[in-house]
Image: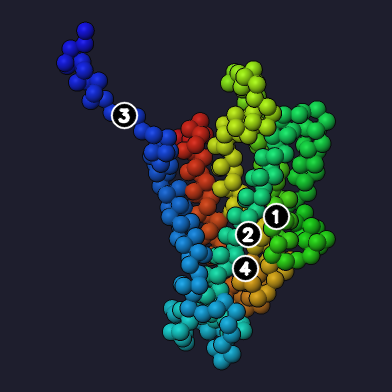
Amino acid sequence: MPTDTTMGQARSQPTPPGPLLAFWRSFRENRGAVLGLTIVAVIVFVAVFAPLLAPYSPSEQFRGSTKLPPFWVIGSDPRFILGTDAVGRDMLSRLIYGSRVSLFIGLSVMVVSMVVGVALGLAAAWFGGIVDVIILRIMDLIMSIPSLVLAILIIAVIGPNLTNTIVAVTIVGLPRYVRLVRASAISELSKDYVIGAKVAGNGPFRLMMVTILPNCMAPLIVQAALGLSDAILEAAGLGFLGLGAQPPVPEWGAMLADSRDLMLSHPWVMALPGIAILTTVLAINLMGDGLRDALDPRLKRS
């Protein structure tokens, strides 16, 4: 019969943390990831509340105030904290609204790529044979062409606009999701819990979506976070070439293209959207690195 001392020791043992708390504790060990998460949270806040934070409309032109420098340069105007562009539009307002456009493109590409990639990856793993070969060969064909070149080719066929930019970037990034889901699903199919679910009479759809897919989510979430930054970069590259979002949409890549003639005479006009792209992509990559460490301890850096 257990003594009072034994029972007291059993009661005093700490309760193991839940999965969310354990995940957060592992995530916050990576200071770079926490910094990245903080920056991403600020950018998302700015994008969501852009109409309240931006001092002017992103397309409003002040004809008598073109090419004004930012506040730290002599000759600035206090009405325009970050100056104005070549046609007199407020740079701060365009950068704020540009965060909304760039995040919308990145999130749209990420969601569509995940949905389509999961469907194709699970189909290839489950059916195998000719279905698997066809899907993999199509993905190999996409991956054999440099991503920006393929995106330019797609845009040249379907036309340049914001929607088609999302379509092109989604097609370019799709193979990563398909191959990742396929590899994860194949490794899970041979495990005992899947065999038990089959014996219990679960159908193929339930096996794939309820039994196998949740166990493939950890690497998929990491890929989605890193794919978000890739999508923003690809969209910015297309915008810089004039094949992405079209004027007057305040997309960061298009803002770079509009200001390239001012690179030497008014460098801040081109530097500001470039810094916005760099900061956003770097923050998302840092956050994705932390997600990788937290979700898969085997990949944790020493």
Q: Say if residue 40 shows up in the picture.
A: yes
Q: Position of residue 299 (x, y in %)?
A: 52, 34
Contact (Cβ within 8 Å) of mark 2 with mark 3: no
Name the residue carrying label 3.
15
Mark 4 to mark 1: distance in Å? 15 Å
Amino acid bearing label 1: Val
Between discs 1 and 3, the one toward the N terminus? 3
Between discs 2 and 3, the one toward the N terminus? 3
Q: Residue furthest bottom?
A: 64
Contact (Cβ within 8 Å) of mark 2 with mark 4: yes
Name the residue carrying label 1.
169
Name the residue carrying label 4.
251
Determine whether 18 is above or below 49 in the image.
above
Mark 2 to mark 3: distance in Å? 43 Å
Name the residue carrying label 2.
105
Determine whether 191 is above or below 259 in the image.
above
Residue under the image location 43 percent in, 78 percent down: 72
Q: Quadrant of the C terminus?
A: top left
Determine whether 200 is above or below 175 in the image.
above
Contact (Cβ within 8 Å) of mark 4 with mark 1: no
